[in-house]
Image: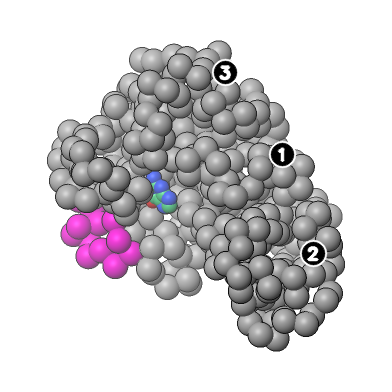
Amino acid sequence: MKFTLQHKDPATKARAGELTTDHGVIRTPIFMPVGTAATVKGIFHRDVRDEARAQIILANTYHLYMRPGMEIIEKAGGVHRFSTWEGPMLTDSGGFQVFSLAACRKLKEEGCHFRSHIDGSKHLFTPESVMDTERTIGADIMMAFDECPPGDAPREYAAKSLALTERWLERCFNRYHQTEPKYGHYQALFPIVQGCTYPDLRAHAAENVKQYDADGYAIGGLAVGEPTDVMYEMIEVVNAILPEERPRYLMGVGTPVNILEAIERGVDMFDCVMPTRNGRNGQLFTAEGVINIRNKKWEDDFSPIDPEGTAFVDTLYTKAYLHHLVTCGEMLAAQIASLHNIAFYLRLVGMAREHIAAGDFKPWKDAMVAKLTRRL
Ligand code: GUN
């Protein structure tokens, strides 16, 4: 997997690059829509690709392992063929989902015992089993199996948890190197830097992952309840240590402002449920600010949803119509809002990329941040 840095912003740590996978090229900085169960909720792949212009989507090992299960995915010939998404894909390892969804978790050296959130059945995820599962799913980028502690974890717990994540990482890489891709395309393995909000633990974690000479590196355990400025500080600490010539992925972040701030600090890849989840609740992100389309003020606003938007829904439908659909609980409302938001996130990182290339990222970003936080 090749990553080429093409532009470095003169005033900040922002970068623009190209990550080449066997399923296509990803131009960074990039946002990856979340497709937990191998579907970006409510949006046809065709629209994710052609309207939102997504270049890579994310799926979850935990969910696909539960349903439909690995036998079906393998029979289908891997997740690309199963879902018919032909572009690059990434799978999260289940580390985060086991801790946020599953019941009765028991953390042991060997792995994590838990009960399914669907039927209560008992399961064990180990670094080895998760690598095997991610091989069977067949995404272009697999994530290491980690523990993601809460944002306010005390130092002693954070240190113990990080040590466990580091031992699991070694086991992940051992298994990764002992196994082959099943479907003929290359699969990268990205380690995840943990360490909660403790700069020295974060620095230790960043130094530790470097030894694996991975195709890319992720920063996890952020946006889990800590203050935003602490999150930015952790990103700075970690990015000062991670190799410059590899992509950096900030997991599960965030708002449009969070993404621009992280790009400024040298992050290349992002994922977040916010555009789809908040879209389903009637929140629209635009370059002029945030719209709550449920608000009565939109009832008779016959202007387009987003006159500058690139997706067909942005200029085809009016705010009044979308307000009406949301009010009636129509499923088309969720579809329109999700597609709009995903397209907006992709447009935002695309603009960031252009301004990095043009050398004026910083003033553009500062002006954008001021607008993005407005409530319309
Ligand atoms: N998604 C958001 N944060 C995390 C994290 O810390 N670990 C994993 N595996 N996934 C995440």
* Three-letter code, disc 1: Arg
Q: In which quarter of the image is the N terminus?
A: top right
173 and 125: which is toward the camera: 125
119 and 289: which is toward the camera: 119
Q: Is residue 12 above or below residue 122?
A: below
At 39% from the left and 15% from the top, the residue drawn is 179
Q: Is residue 6 above or below residue 281?
A: above
At 64% from the left and 63% from the top, the residue drawn is 333
* Three-letter code, disc 3: His
Q: Does the magenta stretch include residue 153?
A: yes
Q: Horizontally, is 292 left or right of 242 in the view?
A: right
- Whichever of callouts 2 and 1 sits on the residue coming sooner in the sequence is 1
| Residue 316 x/y as whole percent | 83, 60
Q: How far apart are marks 2 and 1 (CA)?
A: 19 Å
What number is the disc on residue 46? Answer: 1
- Whichever of callouts 3 and 1 sits on the residue coming sooner in the sequence is 1
Mark 1, Cα crowd under 10 Å, few <14 / some 14-19 / many 20+, is few
- Secondary structure, mark 3, is loop
Q: Distance between the residues labelled 2 and 3?
A: 40 Å
Q: Is residue 376 visible?
A: yes
* Three-letter code, disc 2: Tyr
Q: In this view, does 177 lie above or below 69?
A: above
Mark 2, Cα crowd under 10 Å, few <14 / some 14-19 / many 20+, is some
Q: Distance between the residues labelled 3 and 1?
A: 22 Å
Which residue is identified by label 2? 317
Q: What stretch is highlighted in magenta?
A: 149-160
At 84% from the left and 62% from the top, the residue drawn is 315
Q: Is residue 141 magenta?
A: no
Which residue is identified by label 3? 185
